[in-house]
Amino acid sequence: MRVEEYLSSEIPDKPGVYVFRDRFGEVIYVGKARRLRRRLANYFQPSRKRTADPKTRSLINSIAEWNYELVRSEDEALILESRLIKDYAPRYNILMRDDKRYLLLELDVNERFPTLKPARFKRPGSPSRYFGPFPHGYALKMTLEYLLAHFGLRACRAAEPDAETRKRCLKRIVKDCCGPCTGKVTEAEYRARLDAALRVLDGDIGELKTELSAQIAACAAAENYEKAAHLRDVLANLVAVFGRRNRSFERPELPGIGSGPAAAEALRERLGLTAPLHTIIGFDISNTFGTQAVASMVCFTDGRPDRDRYRRFRIRTVDHSDDFAMMAEAVGRHFGRLLENHLPLPDLLMVDGGRGQLSATLEQLAAMGCPPFPVLGLAKRLEEIILPGVAEPLRLDRHDPALRLLQALRDEAHRFAIGYHRDLREKRMEQSILDTVPGIGPARRKALLRTFGSVRKLRKVTAAEIAERVPGIGPATAERLLKALRG
């Protein structure tokens, strides 16, 4: 079947996100579409290679495989696309590589009178509850302002406003706040108001829609068209942000991440295993011709990433390009810790690679006296599942959730390893660049990096600033340093 025929017959014309990979399995582009079938068809039209701009033509020529994930709405497609671009940083994605994030709503449950506040990040270790993310920031802010006033919730930033703040509180003056800090309502009464607002966040907007529609009609009848228009915008934003169809509190799955327990169960069936696959781990290696070699171990619990259990290793015993030996070292160190501390083994181990990597892993586990458990390799080129003692690899349909789960595990392990390898490489490059500048020894190099953070930031400052902020470096040395870095 030709690609065009497959697209027209198999791909739904619904909102979704698509991912393109090259022949090495690297994610090279992430895109979103309101109508997946139409968008993907544009890439694979025979004439597109001739008429497209050079960047798009290069992208099309690099596509070796692709997959997609359906979502419920365009909002979810926006959020998912943004997350994937931040995770994989595909080289053909120019936009959205910065740190821009969609707004969340934060509720600090430890406050005496909690209220909803916009936030960009989830604070690590925070007891707060978070709702979102929400793609339409302006609509969210307008709707939040209306909800706080409608339910009389606090809009001030201070958890415990002092007397001066209460005196000058504009919301109290215009009666948009029920004044819990002044004792006008009890904590129980305030919590009841908050619970009503949270039900709206959960999509229960029917009562508010009815009330707003009645107010709009009354304002129009009284020829108060300005207020009617404002309330109409409030109603439209309310439906767009908090309508059940548009809610995005449950984060959609990444393309290739599978579908949680259902994907894990599908994989168990394809492998012919009897025990459930609650815990699956995957290993990958990253190095540059044997230098700065690292390994990563990622863990999926019930088919979903369990990032608290991710681990990374700096290869210690292999100083040349030998992926098999590196894989054996990483597996040996991880399982050595498990066996030494009598920790449970995973339900399945996947190594990124073919029979070589799989054989090295099995030999290492056997040498350690590790009890037997399921192990497999995933060969990247044809996405073949390599099983111990089985001559022919297992080949699954590209859209099989079992294969997609293994691909997701492999991609996560690869991303995690690449990130660690890149960090080590950049640190080494920074140190090596500074080492070439006369007058910059180890102590001054450490002081420069400690003060400015990186060579990239160091290039942007002036010689006078360097001389002022770093002890022991004078104007002449600072000028010489910047000349070397910028040259």
Image (spheres, rainbow, N blue to C red):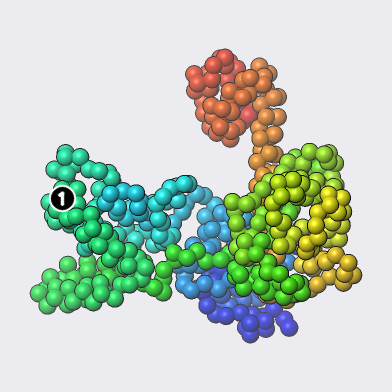
Seen at 60% across and 63% down, the residue is 304
Determine whether, in the image, residue 289 is placed left or right of residue 432.
Answer: right
Seen at 42% across and 60% down, the residue is 132
In which quadrant of the rendered image does the C terminus lie? top right
**Which residue matches tag 1?**
183
Q: Can you tell which quarter of the image residue 431 is in? A: top right
Q: Can you tell which quarter of the image residue 316 is in? A: top right
In this picture, is 267 found above or below 180?
below
In this picture, is 413 found above or below 39?
above
Residue nearest the observer in this picture, 346 or 209: 346
Residue nearest the observer in this picture, 115 or 81: 115
Count of numbered marks: 1
Q: Can you tell which quarter of the image residue 440 is in? A: top right
Instruction: Say what amino acid the circle numbered 1 marks.
Output: Gly
Residue 393, how many percent across, how many down? 84, 70
Determine whether, in the image, residue 101 is placed left or right of residue 453.
Answer: left
In which quadrant of the rendered image does the N terminus lie? bottom right
Q: Is residue 191 visible?
A: yes
Residue 427, how many percent across, how many down? 66, 35
Seen at 51% across and 25% down, the residue is 462
The outermost residue toward the left is 222
The outermost residue toward the front is 342
In this picture, is 39 found above or below 83?
below
In this picture, is 176 found above or below 477?
below
Residue nearest the observer in this picture, 32 or 350: 350
Q: Is residue 78 visible?
A: no
Q: Within 10 angstroms of label 1, few (less than 14), some, or many (20 or more) residues?
A: few
Residue 150, how many percent across, how many down? 21, 63
Determine whether, in the image, residue 130 is placed left or right of residue 254.
Answer: left
Residue 3, how many percent across, how many down? 69, 78
Classify mark 1: helix, strand or loop: loop
Seen at 56% across and 68% down, the residue is 17
